[in-house]
Amino acid sequence: MKRREFLKDIAIGSLFLNISTLLHPQEKGFPHIALIQGESPSDITREAINTLGGMKKFIARGDLVVVKPNIGWDRNPQQAACTNPEVVKTVIELCFDAGAKQVKVLDNPCNPARRTYVRSGIAEAAKKAGATVLFPNPHHLKKIAIKGEWLKEWEVYTDFIETDKIINVPIAKTHSLSRLTMGMKNWLGAIGGKRNQLHQNIDFAMIDLSSFFNPVLTVLDAYRILLRNGPQGGRLSDAMLYKTIVAGTDYVAVDALGATFFGIKPEELRYLQLAHQKGMGEIHLENLNIAKKTL
């Protein structure tokens, strides 16, 4: 069953399944998570995905794929407020190598999209890789039943629904509300409406949105991480060169591992605690098979 058909069934209430179990079974012989370090953002991204079994494990021939980076702020790659463009480009290239029919790139930034897409370098990199780069279009917003514990419905960009696969490509950085923003927080860029209303219960909003969008793969960009003044930073001294990529199908586990880059234990983040309690993913890193490699 294609993702778009699956989500449509959920939206009309005709199907209720554990999506995580259905879409992301753990295969024997492969690690839960790949953590790769090296000098080239492209090389370590490619190695991380290959370590998990290669992109063909996640993308089938003819698939329509949406890649969701963080393009939220009018910042350049050195400022580490948006996903590294070389990471995004490599993910797109691997999707096409696996047989994807079309790859779309989309985010709903906090700053004007026509500035953030250009200054981040993501628009140019994505186009070079052959992707269709979309600006957020209010005509593509549709109120959808999220069916979360706290978030019942919200305006969602239909591009994220009318697709076969979603790959989440966030950046690791600090955040004034949730302490950190990585994969689970990145989904606020897939929706419209008055997003500041979600701040009153940001942990539950992150959990409900993550469960709804449920990416087939999460690739966490930690080539540069934003240590201070997140989520937008601004000074080069706010960022640190970390030269790391983390990839996995368990987005909770990916965020849990990413938290350690900031000296934070996963159990200290409420949204990770709650997600683990709900059975959405693993936060106890000792229970994970983590493949580590330096190129």
Image (cartoon, rainbow, N blue to C red):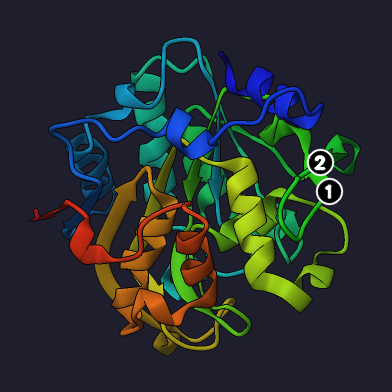
Give the left or right position of residue 136, taking residue 226 as reference: right
Residue 295, above or below 81: above
SS label for mark 1:
strand
Q: Name the residue under label 2.
A: 145
Q: Name the residue under label 1.
A: 153
x%, y% of residue 277?
Answer: 48, 62
Mark 1 Cα shell of 10 Å, populated few (<14), some (14-19), many (≥20): some
| In the image, farthest residue toward the top | 62
At x 69%, y 25%, the residue is: 15
At x 39%, y 77%, the residue is: 267
Q: Are marks 1 and 2 in contact (CB under 8 Å)?
A: yes
x%, y% of residue 56?
Answer: 31, 21
- 219 and 41: which one is in front? 219
- 231 and 179: which one is in front? 179
Quadrant of the frame with the N terminus: top right
- 114 and 87: which one is in front? 87
The number of numbered badges drawn on the structure is: 2
User: Is residue 71 in sight in this rendering?
Assistant: no
CA gap, disc 1 to disc 2? Answer: 4 Å
Query: Where is residue 238, by image quadrant?
Result: bottom left
Query: Where is residue 140, by image quadrant?
Result: top right
Give the left or right position of residue 144, taking residue 20 as reference: right
Residue 80: numbered disc? none
Residue type pointed to by label 2: Ala
Residue 168, above or below 15: below
x%, y% of residue 88?
Answer: 44, 45
Residue 3, above or below 91: above
